[in-house]
Every structure is written in structure tokens, then in C-alpha cells.
Amino acid sequence: MSMATASIHLMNNYSRWPVRLVKGQGNTVWDEAGRSYLDFTSGLGVTSLGHVPPSVAKKLHEQIDTLWHSSNLFEHPLQEQLAAKLCQVSGLDRAFFCNSGAEANEAAIKLARRYAQRVKGEERYEVITFQQSFHGRTLATLTATGQEKVKDGFAPLPDGFKSIPFNDSQALRNAISDRTCAVMLELVQGEGGVHPADPAWVKEVRQLCDEHGILLIIDEVQTGIGRTGDWFAFQQYGIKPDIISVAKALGSGFPVGGILADSHVAEGFAPGSHGTTFGGNPLAMAAGIATLETIEQEQLLVKVKALHQSLFQRLQQIQQAVPDKVKAVRGRGLLLGMEVTLPAADILAAAREQGVLLLQAGPQVVRLLPSFVTTEAEIDQVADLLLSIIRSQ
Ligand SMILES: *Cc1c(COP(=O)(O)O)cnc(C)c1O
């Protein structure tokens, strides 16, 4: 492995792996020295179609020669096209585009508050979120996040957020008050340890929100755009959210985020109430359109479900082989986690030495986010490697 020296000119806010990647294609990435790695991180759930997918690259090349930026002062055919497509596959009515997951959740929170105050005329502002959740790094979204480590050193935090236990109906009943405007929820907590929500509980959450006139925001930043085997995780839970946020995989690596909302809720925003310079930029829209078209044309949702079966089964076999070291295997689609008794970081480092890139979700969960174009042979390779690493540690 090439020993990297961290730049003295970059801020020290990441603990980076000593790998300097310079090229990617499909499921393979290469470092400066020309060494290849099998990528089971998808760049943190972003490159779901693999690296540099040809269909998205083609569309981006065309757009590079056409128009890069016009601003939101103008109407925008590509925004309209991507919005229509996202509404069609989600069943929601209106889209707003931004540049990242945190910005999407920030927009969702702003829309929920403004809807309550302007459209419903109620003094509601509080957003209920869940322990171990992750919603982003802006001041509002880190406050919404149910993990203390992301809040460290940033007080005073904005008012109006409450984090309660996940998958706990009584906790939610107790937390709801006449100040509650929204519940914000990941259906599979990604960063927080790959914890899927209990389907019966999610139905109850929807019901409680309906009873109390509270909006349900589903954070689909990591679970959305096919990651769980449907376009959105909420479609597997038999509920309809009022607002969803998306980002990570939407542009296949080109930065783009957004929210989708029910048309009535979307009335919470009026001209001037929210905006962004870059959001919905033509390059980002081209990447998003090509990403959705590719998922559709190559029937990748079906593929995600099939790959899930294989990978989940292989991980369960590892658990059966070394039950003292693997406590649980969890997740949906190609968002999977293996809870281990060893430090996950050690397993990741050993895998990296062997040319396989994996993720963590907390200190004792190995997280796997392979692309939708992963092969059965690659799943076998990773599973064999994981078993041998865990056995030998
Ligand atoms: C990654 C992530 C975010 C934050 O997205 P950024 O693009 O990093 O701002 C928010 N919510 C969830 C569920 C995520 O996984």
C-alpha cells in the first residue's frame, strides 16, 4: 500500500485512509501507484451505477458542450424533466433541487416549519428525530441528527429538535406535543449502524402523524434511488411520506440533492422563501436524468433485489461459521451491515490490504454498499475475504 502523507494545506476534519485514488471504472478504483481495488463503498453510497457509468458520462459530456449554469432566475427544462421523473417514480408531486443531502434535509425542515406556520396557521416548529440517526452537518441537520459526536463543539444549537429512541412507539407518543410540526426518519439508519425500521412501527408512525396533523419526512439520502431494491425505501414500508429528501446516488457522483413533497405541503414555499445558486444546475440535472434512465433501462432495481439475496445469504453464512465474532447481519437491498465483536476498523484495514474497500457504520459494524452492477463473482470474492479476515483476527 502506498503510504500517503496528508496535505498540510487541507483542514484536518477527516480521518482519511492512506489510499490516494485517481481513477475508477465500474466496480474498480485505482490508486496513484496503479494498484486496483474492488469498491464495495460506492463512494459512500453515491456511485450506485459503478464508477464513470458510460450512459451518465455521455449525457454529461453533451451537457458540458451545451450549458453549464443559468441560475434559478430562469425556467429550467432539465429541472422540469428530472422533477417529473422523480415525481413519477415516487408518487409525490413537486421537487426542489439543491446540492447535497444536508441541504436537502435543511430544505425539508424549512418546508415543514413554513407549511405549519403559513399554510396551516399553527405555531408549530418542533421536529422529532431518532437516536443514532444521521441527517447532515449543517447546524439544523446536525441538531436533527441523533448522535452526540456530530454536535461536539457547535453549541448553541438551533431550538426545536428532539431525538427519541428508534422503533419505539411509546417514546413517540410521549414526544408529540402541540408544537410538533414533523417527524424525520431514516427507514434504514445508514451511518448509525445499518438499523432497519420495524415495518409495524413505521405504519404506526404514519398513523400518529395523521392523527396529530404532523408531517412525515423520510430521509432517503442514503436509501433512495434504488439502494434498497425499490426506488425509495418508503415503498417497501407501505406508507406515503409528506416529504422525502434525496442526494447521494441521484447524480451517480455529480453533486445533486433535492426534496420531493406532496403538492399541498409544497405550498409551504412561496417565491423568495427558499433558494440556492447552484441547486438544479444543468450539469447536475443531466447526471440525475441519465442516472434514473439507466436504472430503468437496465432494470437495476430487479438486480439490486437479486444481489441482496446473494450477499445477505453469504453474510449469514459467515455469521453461522463464526458466531462468536459476528453478532448480526442486517439491512435492505444493497445497504447491509454486519455487526462484529472485533473493531470494524481492523477488518476494513485488512480488507484494504487485500484490495477490497468496505465501510463502517460505527465502531462495530462493517457496512457494505456495493454498486448495482456488482457481479456474483465479486460478492463471492468479498464474502470469502471477510470470512478469512474475521476468522484470523
Ligand atoms: C449522507 C447522509 C446525509 C448527508 O448528506 P451530505 O450530502 O453529506 O450532506 C443525510 N442523511 C443521510 C441519511 C445520509 O446518509
Image (spheres, helix red, strand yellow):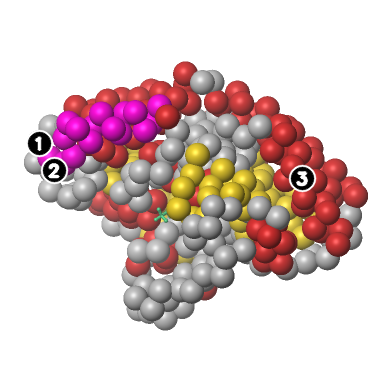
Q: Earlier in the sequence, mark 3 or mark 1?
A: 1
Mark 3, residue position: 383
Q: Earlier in the sequence, mark 2 or mark 3?
A: 2
Left or right: where does residue 389 sit relative to residue 258? right
- Kindly report the distance in space between the C-alpha atoms of the residues bearing marks 3 and 1: 50 Å
In front: mark 2 or mark 3? 3
Mark 3 close to ligand 1, CB under 8 Å: no
| Residue 13 vs residue 63, the one in the foreground | 63
Do residues under tags 1 and 2 come within 8 Å of each other at their CB atoms?
Answer: yes
Name the residue rendered at 13%, 43% in the picture. 71
Point out residue 108 in the picture as x, y percentages from the top left corner.
34, 49
Span shown in magenta: 55-72
Name the residue rendered at 74%, 42% in the picture. 381
Circle 2: residue type: Ser
**Residue ranking furthest to the front:** 33
Mark 2, residue position: 71
Label 1 crowding class (10 Å Cα cut-off): few <14, some 14-19, many 20+?
few
Mark 1 close to ligand 1, CB under 8 Å: no
Circle 3: residue type: Ala
Which mark identifies residue 340? none
Left or right: where does residue 354 sit relative to residue 38? right
Mark 1, residue position: 74
In front: mark 3 or mark 1? 3
Point out residue 102 in the picture as x, y percentages from the top left corner.
37, 55
Circle 1: residue type: Phe
Point out residue 177 in the picture as x, y percentages from the top left corner.
44, 58
Left or right: where does residue 200 sit relative to residue 76? right
